[in-house]
């Protein structure tokens, strides 16, 4: 199992159902370093011009998660110069067996749609 920690920053808790593309690097050599995963996950070619080639990454799965049942007081409130926002921290676990599977884990519990 491979586990990576992620978070989402939200200005509102109105929409707590997320979709994230799980990507595999398909280019030559080492994959580039993704400093801003939020912009990357939106697949914006203005931030990552190499995405214009259409072959650099492949979507291997779409991970969907529903946080509507998580009590809202569990989300961290962050105050910045731009105001308050909520931070939802979670792990994505990837298992490689006969197939690849992804799970979104929040405080030890698997979150599903």
Image: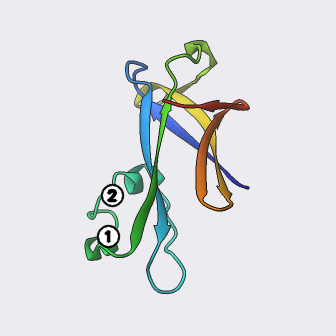
Kind of element beneath mark 1? helix
Q: 75 left or right of 1?
A: left
Residue drawn at point x = 41 percent, y = 67 percent: 58
User: Is the Cβ of the residue at disc 2 closer than 8 Å to that at disc 1?
Assistant: yes
Q: In this orientation, does residue 81 appear?
A: no
Give the vertical position of 22 relative to 91 (above or below): below
Residue drawn at point x = 33 percent, y = 57 percent: 43
Q: In this orientation, does residue 104 appear?
A: yes
Residue at the extreme bottom: 28
Query: Looking at the rendered structure, which numbered label has been put on residue 43?
Result: 2
Q: 86 left or right of 96?
A: left
The numbered mark, 2 or 1, whose residue comes first in the sequence reads 2
- Using the rendered view, name the quadrant where residue 83 is placed: top left
Give the vertical position of 111 relative to 7 (above or below): above
Task: Please tell me how crowded label 2 is: few (under 14), some (14-19), or many (20+) other residues with Cα within 10 Å.
Answer: some
Question: Mark 1 highlights which residue?
Answer: 51
């Amino acid at each position: 199992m491979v586990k990576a920690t992620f978070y989402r920053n939200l200005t509102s808790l109105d929409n707590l159902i997320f979709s994230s593309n799980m990507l595999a690097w398909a280019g030559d050599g080492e994959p580039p370093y993704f400093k801003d995963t939020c912009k990357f996950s939106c697949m914006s070619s203005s931030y990552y011009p190499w995405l214009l080639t259409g072959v650099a990454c492949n979507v291997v799965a779409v991970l969907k998660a529903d946080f509507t049942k998580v009590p809202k007081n569990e989300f961290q409130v962050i105050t910045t110069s731009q105001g308050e926002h909520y931070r939802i921290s979670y792990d994505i676990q990837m298992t490689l067996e006969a197939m690849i599977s992804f799970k979104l884990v929040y405080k030890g519990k698997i979150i599903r749609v």
